[in-house]
Each structure stands twice: as C-alpha cells, then as structure tokens.
C-alpha cells in the first residue's frame, strides 16, 4: 500500500476551511479519498507524497492535450506580459470565434462564458427569448450543470424517478427553487416515439430541447440510429429550439464535436472543457437569428470575466494544436482510446467478470453489469458500483487514476506504454479486489 500521509494531513487541514475539504462536490466521491496533487505533466500526475499516476480523469475532461501542454502554456506566458483581462474587446476573441465558426456546423455566431453551467443558462434563456415559450424538455440522467434551472433529474434514484415512460422531474439539491419544476418536462432518452407524442401535446409551450448528443455523464451512451435526426425533424416541425450540450463532446470527438460526428445540426450548442485545454472557457454557439437577440438587447448576457485575454490566448493555441497536421491529435485519440477500451474489455472477459465497456475512442465507460448494452439512464443503474469503486481505489494504489463513476478520458499525451501499464495494473487490481 502506498503512503499518502501528507495528502491525508492536508485533507484534514482543509476540512477546517473548505466544506468537505474540497473545492467541488464531485471530488468528494474520489476513491480512495480526495488526493492532494503537487504537479502534473503530459498524461501523468504526482501527489504531495510523491506518488505518480497515469491520469484518465483529466480534470473531468478538459485536458484534451494532457497536462501543461507546451504550445498552450507558451501562448499564455506571452499573453501574461500583455494583459490579463481588459474589460473591453481584443483580437483574440475574434480569432477564437472565427475558429469555432470554421469547425462547428451550427456556429453562425458565438458568445463566450467561463463555465459550462453559465453557457447552458445562456442557451436556455436564448431559447425562451426566441420562441416566447417557457418549457424546456430535458432527459433523465443528463447533466447540464449545477444551476437551479438545469440540475433536474440528472441522477435520481429509482424511488424518486417515477414511471419509466413518465419520469418525475426531480430536484437534485437542497436549496433549489422548486418553481423551476414548472418549466421542465423530463423524458427518458433514446425514445423518439415518446418525444414526438410529448411535442404533439405540449409543442406550443416548449421553448427548447436540451440533450447531450452522446450521453457522456451517465454511461457514455450513444444515440440509437435515427434518434438525433428524428429529434432535429421534430424541433423544426414544432418550432422548438434544439440545444446540444457539447460541454464534454465538443472538441473531444473532433473539431466539429458530436454534431460533426453525427451530421445533425442543432440550433444552439454549448461548449466548454476541451475548447481551452484546461483554462476556464465556455461558449454558446448557434444560428444568427437566435444569437442576435443578444445584440438587440432582447436577451441579456453578461460577465466580467468573459473573453479574458489569457484564457482566449489558451483557447486559440488549443484550437491551432487540434487543427495541426490535419487533425493528427484526433487520430491518436481514437487509436489510443480503442486500444485501451478493447484491452479492458478483453481483460474483463478473460477474468469472467460481467461487464460492459461502452463506446471507445476519446472517452468511454466501464460498468460492472450483466447488461449487454445501455440505452438510457435507468439501464445504467443495473451496475455494481460498490465493486467498481473498490477497483478504482485499487488502481489508484497502483498508480492509475480513474473516475469512480466509470467514465474514462483520453488525451493526446497518453501513450501505448501508458495503456500497457494500465492494463497490467487493472489485472493486479482485479486479483486483489475480486480474488
């Protein structure tokens, strides 16, 4: 067992000043416990006790180029001497917007924010402002940030969730305004017939539909064949704004995000995480007729830190790196992700452990389950979380850091050697945890 004496001591110290000793709730779930880190480079991290880890959490996904990528760091260093934030316009924000417009199918105009939650909030406000309607359709198990209007039925228990075809709208936090439930319709994902029936009944009340195009936050579930295409047709028919939450998929699955991958163009899309390779940047992008509501002052959008010069310098360097050599980063991401996910799948089969390795490539999901596939959120509840979390803790003890909820992220910095070491560590962890 490796030592984490300093990390433990820091956690105890932090609990006096920070709720739970951490800066974000998701870190409370880390196994074996929230670890304090000292530095990171490439695909590796080192904690305050000197332990080294191959990192597949990647700060919950933003680090598409790995830790401290040299082109991004150099661009930031140069900008630091020129100014941090201007409270005014500068060329970098135009250059980044032009890059996003170049690559993202729906992006006729772009507005920048700092976090995914902010960008989702802006997209929902734009949808309501454009249509004059109030209700939003969201899907069970989809996470769209922690703000009141979006943190609904992102991870309800079966006892809370209600009937499978008519889910309850469930608040996920104490202190949320209960009134937000009046404006949300929750549906199961991947059920086009039910979505069509809902729009036929409530279409004149619904401003927008928000969806993860790949259900990354709950199982990395792919849409059924024709599902996103059908959603697009229905939104057009009923005058509903289609919003893709590409906070995770954007610039991870390709320069065009999931909409480029599937060839389905939403009216609005939300991006964050990978767009600036770890710096705090998000944006809402979409049709000019909708986005211009902001310029017309009919929909308000503001933010002191929007388009800070240092962050925009990071984003421009990131996008240039993702474009380089005709997208070589993505060829590597897909290849290394396939090697790792296929290796995990084969190892679990060899060890006769019922499991599902869902998806492949730049991110994938591992669940200990008898299910052959997942189609929606409730399928993901048929998994052995307790054993998986013990495996995550055992992997951490062997120098491999993963999310305890099953989602794995790959970066441009991961290598074939990282994969080989990870698979050997997983074999050892399985032997230790499952005998």
Image (tube, rainbow, N blue to C red):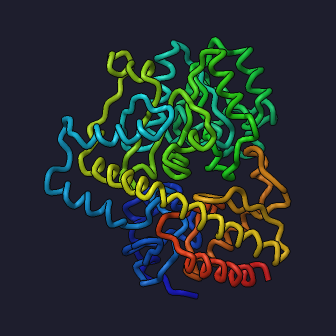
> In the picture provided, is 190 more to the left or to the right than 131?
right
Q: Residue at x 69, y 80 (%)?
A: 429
Residue 350: horizontal and vertical position, in percent? 82, 77
Q: Residue at x 56, y 27 (%)?
A: 180
| Residue 349 versus residue 62 in the image, above or below | below
* Most foreground residue, 288 or 402: 288
Residue 426: horizontal and vertical position, in percent? 67, 78
> In the picture provided, is 421 more to the left or to the right than 74?
right
| Residue 75 versus residue 228 in the image, above or below | below
| Residue 86 versus residue 311 in the image, above or below | above
> In the picture provided, is 72 more to the left or to the right than 260?
left
Residue 41: horizontal and vertical position, in percent? 40, 73
Query: Which residue is at the far front?
Result: 326
Q: Residue at x 20, y 54 (%)?
A: 79
Residue 1: horizontal and vertical position, in percent? 58, 88
* Most foreground residue, 9 or 156: 156
Kindly indicate the quadrant of the structure image that contains residue 298.
Answer: top left
């Amino acid at each position: 067992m490796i030592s984490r004496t300093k990390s433990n001591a820091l956690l105890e110290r932090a609990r006096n000043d920070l709720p739970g000793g951490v800066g974000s709730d998701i870190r409370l779930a880390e196994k074996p416990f929230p670890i304090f880190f000292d530095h990171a480079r490439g695909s590796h991290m080192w904690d305050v006790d000197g332990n080294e880890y191959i990192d597949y959490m990647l700060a919950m996904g933003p680090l598409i180029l790995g830790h401290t990528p040299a082109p991004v760091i150099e661009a930031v260093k140069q900008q630091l001497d020129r100014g941090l934030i201007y409270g005014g316009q500068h060329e970098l924000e135009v250059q980044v917007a032009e890059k996003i417009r170049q690559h993202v199918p729906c992006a006729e105009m772009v507005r920048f924010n700092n976090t995914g939650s902010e960008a989702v909030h802006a997209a929902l406000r734009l949808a309501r402002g454009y249509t004059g309607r109030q209700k939003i359709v969201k899907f069970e198990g989809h996470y769209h940030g922690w703000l009141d209007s979006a943190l609904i039925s992102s991870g309800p228990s079966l006892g809370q969730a209600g009937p499978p075809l008519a889910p309850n709208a469930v608040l996920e936090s104490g202190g949320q305004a209960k009134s937000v439930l009046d404006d949300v319709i929750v549906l199961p994902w991947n059920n086009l017939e039910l979505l069509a029936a809902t729009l036929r009944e409530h279409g004149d009340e619904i401003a927008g539909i928000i969806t993860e195009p790949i259900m990354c936050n709950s199982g990395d579930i792919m849409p059924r064949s024709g599902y996103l295409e059908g959603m697009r047709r229905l939104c057009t028919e009923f005058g509903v704004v289609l919003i893709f939450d590409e906070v995770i998929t954007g610039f991870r699955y390709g320069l065009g995000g999931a909409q480029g991958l599937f060839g389905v163009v939403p009216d609005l899309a939300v991006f964050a995480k990978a767009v600036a390779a770890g710096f705090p940047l998000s944006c809402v992008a979409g049709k000019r007729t909708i986005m211009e509501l902001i310029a017309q002052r009919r929909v308000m959008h503001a933010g002191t830190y929007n388009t800070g010069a240092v962050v925009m310098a990071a984003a421009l360097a990131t996008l240039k790196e993702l474009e380089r050599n005709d997208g070589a980063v993505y060829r590597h991401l897909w290849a290394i992700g396939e090697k790792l996910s296929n290796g995990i799948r084969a190892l679990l089969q060899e060890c006769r452990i019922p499991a599902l390795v869902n998806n492949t490539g730049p991110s994938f999901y591992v669940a200990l389950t008898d299910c052959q596939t997942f189609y929606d959120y409730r399928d993901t509840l048929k998994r052995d979380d307790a054993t998986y979390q013990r495996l995550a803790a055992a992997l951490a003890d062997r120098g491999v850091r993963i999310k305890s909820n099953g989602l794995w992220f790959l970066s441009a910095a991961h290598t074939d050697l990282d994969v080989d070491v990870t698979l050997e560590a997983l074999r050892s962890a399985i032997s230790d945890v499952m005998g």
